Amino acid sequence: MPETERLGRILRELPRPVVVLLAGVAVNRMGSLLQIFLVLYLTHIGFSPARAGLALTAYGAGSLIGVSASGAVCDRIGPRRAIVVAMAGSGALTALLPAASGFGVIVALCLGAGAVTQLYRPAALAMLASLTPASRLVVTSAAYRLALNIGVTLAPLGGVALAAYSYYLVFLADAATSLAFAAMAMFSLPGQLTAEPGAPRGPKGPGEPAADERPVTGYRAVLADRRFLIILGAMLAVALAEVQYQAVLPLQIHARHLPTVLYAAVLTINGAMVIVLELPATPYVQKLPMRLTIAGGCGLIGLGISLFGLPAGAWIFPVGAVVWTTGEIVSAPSTSAYPALVAPDQLRGRYIGAMNTSQTLGYTAGPSLGTALYQSAGSWMWLTCLILGGLSALGMWTGVHRKISMGPK
């Protein structure tokens, strides 16, 4: 069967709860406006840029706390409840923000909103894994990423239109979409999940002991999985490199006296390629061994980002964007699916949460580290991105189980 027909069949045969989950993710991301417009809103109502930046930092710190706790919350209360709690809490705290006047209250609301918003991520991926046959999980993960990216792309456009009338509408729209996702999860997603029968897994993990052994539970089991720890380190490395497109790339373009529209072009290339190509390409990529796609994709991400530092013409920036995005397209669906495929069923949320935490930590620490290195070493900073990409590729190749291969069915 041609890959396009197989892809169409997989998408047509998605279980109704999976369709609801993907729709809910897209709706929620289309309304994810707080982080985008927070600084503009706070300076608009009279706070200094420094204080506005502090509030945004509080939101980021809350996000890191939330994603760190999200796996345990998902495993303890179940994916559906975790999604409902996360989205209801996010909606409530975001709706309260326009009513807050004291800076301390605003910071507390931002911290809380950042934390509860992140609780849904491993829950959504864990539910996706439980509702999808393992042989189709990589393709379904690509569909999940498509829903995310469509929402992320549309969010700023809708937010700008609402902000032209009132910032209050911006935050109310954010709250409304979160509450809509909570309602969709409450009434349309299953509460009890079972593992997909016959799902291929890696070798028995630390959370799946023999009958006469006492089980290792919680994050102790994740930390006892040495191969997965290598993967977490590799994920941290590639995230530190990739986030430099936000932190250092604008500085590099400015230092070379190139127009700002070039930076916009890089971002447009990345977004357009991911939305248009990732899902159709996934059935072809899925034929390859998973360790090859994950490791190779991470290497391409580091290589593509490092190309931005070459002393070439302006053409090097679109080329770097294409190489970087190709790495993302090749690796991201498999990377999203991998923790659910190798985790013991009772630890699935923790494995996914640990992966998200490692990535979030890289995205959080990367900008300050990258800009500091760029200030001291200039364009040599981009060599660090190449090294990080290489280390990530090596780590993924070492850590990903050889027996995991999700050929299409």
Image (cartoon, rainbow, N blue to C red):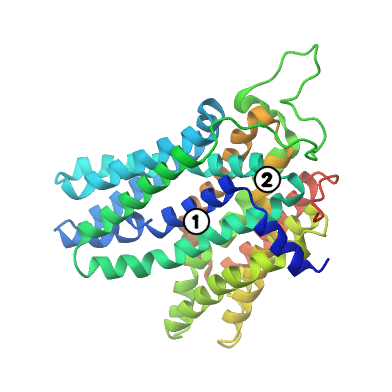
Q: Are marks 2 and 1 in contact (CB under 8 Å)?
A: no
Amino acid type for the residue under numbered disc 2: Thr
Q: Position of residue 253 (x, y in %)?
A: 47, 79
Q: Nearer the viewer, residue 249 or 98?
A: 98
Q: Position of residue 97 (x, y in %)?
A: 23, 47
Near mark 1 (Cα within 10 A), the count class, few <14, some 14-19 or many ≥20, is: some
Amino acid type for the residue under numbered disc 1: Leu
- From the viewer's perspective, tell me whether residue 228 is left or right of residue 164: right
Residue at which label 2 appears: 132
- Residue 212 at least partly seen: yes
Q: Which mark is residue 369?
A: 1
Numbered disc 2: secondary structure: loop
Q: Quadrant of the C terminus?
A: bottom right
Q: Nearer the viewer, residue 99 or 14?
A: 14
Q: Nearer the viewer, residue 42 or 236?
A: 42
Q: In terms of image quadrants, where is residue 4?
A: bottom right
Q: Residue at position x 15%, y 58% from top?
A: 45
- From the viewer's perspective, tell me whether residue 342 is left or right of residue 259: right
- From the viewer's perspective, tell me whether residue 20 is left or right of residue 117: right
Q: Position of residue 235 (x, y in %)?
A: 64, 50
Q: Position of residue 51 (x, y in %)?
A: 23, 53
Q: Residue at position x 49%, y 64% from top?
A: 150
Q: Which mark is residue 147?
A: none
On screen, residue 170 above or below 226: below
Q: Return the disc, 2 or 1, that comes first in the chain's sequence.
A: 2
